[in-house]
Image: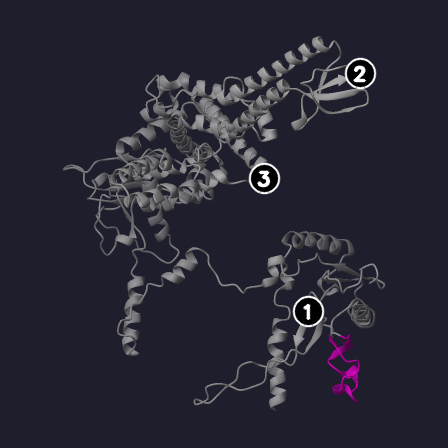
Amino acid sequence: MNHILNSIIEAKHVDENAYDEILMEFDDYLDIVALKDSDFSEFSPENTRVDEFFYEIMNASKCRNLWKVVEMLLLLSHGQATVEKGLSFSKKVVVENMEDPSPDMISNRLDAIDDLIQIPEVVEAAVAILKKIPDLERLLSKIHTYGFARSQYHPESRAIYYEAETYNKRKINDFLSTLEGFKQTSEIISMFKPHLNDFKSVLLKKCVSSEENIGHFPDMTNELKYFEEAFDHEVAKKQGNIIPSPGVDKEYDFATAEIAKMLKEFDTFLAEQRRSLNCKVSYVGTGKNRYMLEVPENRKVPSEFEFQGGRKGFKRYYTKETKDLLARLTSAEESRASALRDITRRIFAHFDQNYKMWKTAVQCISTFDVLISLVLYYKSSGVPMCRPKFFFPNEDIEPHLEIIEGRHPTFLKYFTGDDYIPNSVYIGPKRDNKKEDVNSGGRLVLVTGPNMGGKSTLMRQAGTLIIMAHLGSYVPAESMSLTPVDRIFTRVGASDQISKDKALILNSKLSGLDDFKASSGWLEKFKIRHGIRQLNIEAEKMSADVVAGDSIIAEIEKLIKEENLSLEQIYNCDETELYWKALLEKTLAAVHDTSAYGRKRMKDTVTVLACSNASGSHKLKLAVVGKSRNPRCFKNVNRSALPAHYLNQKNAWMDSQLFSKWFFDIFVPSVKSWQEKANLNGVLLLFDNCPPYPDTDFLKSGNIQCLFLPPNATSAATYGLGRFRVFKMALPEEINQKITF
């Protein structure tokens, strides 16, 4: 395409005729290549009026957002998993059904449900097949792309794939899945052939009958048979290459025939040389040195024989004839290899020639898929279901909505029978006396009641049943009649406007901005609606092994049961670095001060090790690891009276030797003393699996045992969150107070 555009730019300055020719070439490129088999539809909005409430109207375009609701209604009620995979390419059909809810089409869908209910065995068998069908619409698009012949100027035509065999296997698997999917659709159509005359629904007949009758489903028998015999499917799956059967590809067949012809000529020439030399002559060599004549050393050969080498007792020769035959054979082999390199694309291109036929089959099976889902929803509801009745408004019939004993569809999964109290709704002109028990009717119904009384549920129930009725589904109610509904208003509440008015009044009292505009709190509502919340960023969780963190829980629970341990007997220790000279970075300043002067942040560090049992009833003294063996601050100080144990290491790090000392000299005596007072027996110590810690087999003392946590799993566990947060937040403030006062 870049080549064509560059030609247009150059030609515009050279020749008007050449410029017109290139423009025509570009137009052909768009029609034939870029837009080939594209699916376009003209957008013609029925109402272009934009008013104050336009963003609150749930019109046809916004019905697309209801797909999840529809999917839940059709598939998840009472745990029924119906057409799990088939529905992946039927979503578009559902959306189209909601966008074009003509009464005739709705009646056709309802008739289809009635027809399918009469043949439950066939429906059950069809559902079993539909579950196996892949997303045919997506696969058709992929095969169209695979079979697209790229121009020599297109980058993809020059691309060299790193794992070409893997890509080819995926393409072939997609193609074979598509063929299998269309075979299965044909099976479904054949299952309904004996029942066509009994169907009332024209829509159902068109979906499940062939073009020979009144149906739209195409006859794919010949095409499927062609691709079934075109190549060995199992070999193609394993090798990632398609070897076409004879008669499938002309280029490959011609090259194969040429190779066979050359081999035959080689055999003929060899027989002639054997007769001429009257001795044993054979071909030897590989690669470029193939087909050398090997002749016994003592045999005289003609002068045109070119000596190439030999072995003990034999000599090897080339002749003008063998060179010529080898060149022709090499050329034929290259032609065959070239044909094989492009054979997969040509097979896909041949499949794509009948794109409209495959597309029609997908549309038929998609519509049938939706009808099957509506049937299964009807059968699995477990409550009274009715067929909604639509009326066109006229002089005798005014716009109305009547729902008698209706139920919310999504609640049927949880409430059935007497657990759910149905509700009736009537909106429209005043009713006759026989129906006064529902309500008196009116163009507007005001719903009142206490909080959590079901007002919103009732309104959502009415809206959902309207959508289901326009979809062509049976609805959970005793009866339902309505005139076509073109829009449903949502988020029409008074609280938003009240909040805006209060904000405007407050802004005027505070002498705020002149151009102040109050929002309706859309950001908070957006976060609540989509479940968005604020979390702290934790870098360690990027490398956390969540699976290992979950598995260790089961191991710990098993150990607790075996040893009969309580929370008082389970300990956990961990360490952290503490920059003890890094004081507070903020301070108070006078109004005229523009900055606060100070020193650079100090990075003197110590390691702090904390340990406690799970109940928090026994907290050991902190263990502090510094660099100096005898710090000056400890001169003339009784270390045993300090609120922490002091240890030393040249880098102020915890190492294996230091941890062993802490375990045997500090942890074991302290825990044993506390366990004796609490009359408990047995202790389990949990700590991170990091290099400085010694092996758990070494860390044993009586009934005290240790257990490593999995590597890189600390931050994924709940005990790893915020263990030192309070300590690190409080320490600088306490140090600052002691320095100040």
Contact between labelled residues 2 and 3, with CB atoms less than 8 Å apart: no
Q: Quadrant of residue 188?
A: top left
Q: Which residue bears the numbered disc 2?
A: 298
Residue 207 position within the rendered picture, expressed as x and y whole percent measured from the top left: 37, 25
Q: Is residue 288 visible?
A: yes
Query: Which range is magenta?
Result: 622-650
Residues 494 and 709: in front is 709
Q: Earlier in the sequence, mark 2 or mark 1?
A: 2
User: Which dot, 1 or 3, sits closer to the camera?
Assistant: 3
Check the picture and name the quadrant holding the N terminus. top left
Q: Residue beneath label 1, please?
A: 616
The CA span between labels 1 and 3 is 57 Å
In the picture, residue 99 is in which quadrant?
top left
Residue 665 location (% of width, % of height)? 83, 72
Above or below, comparing residue 670 to residue 102 in the picture: below
Which labelled disc corresponds to residue 163?
A: 3
**Of callouts 1 and 3, which one flags the residue occurring earlier in the amino acid sequence?**
3
Amino acid at dot 1: Gly
How far across and down, in percent of the image, does residue 285 sit?
70, 24
Is residue 408 at all visible to an observer of this figure? Answer: no
The residue shown at (49%, 39%) is: 158
How far apart, in angstroms, are the residues tagged by discs 2 and 1? 101 Å
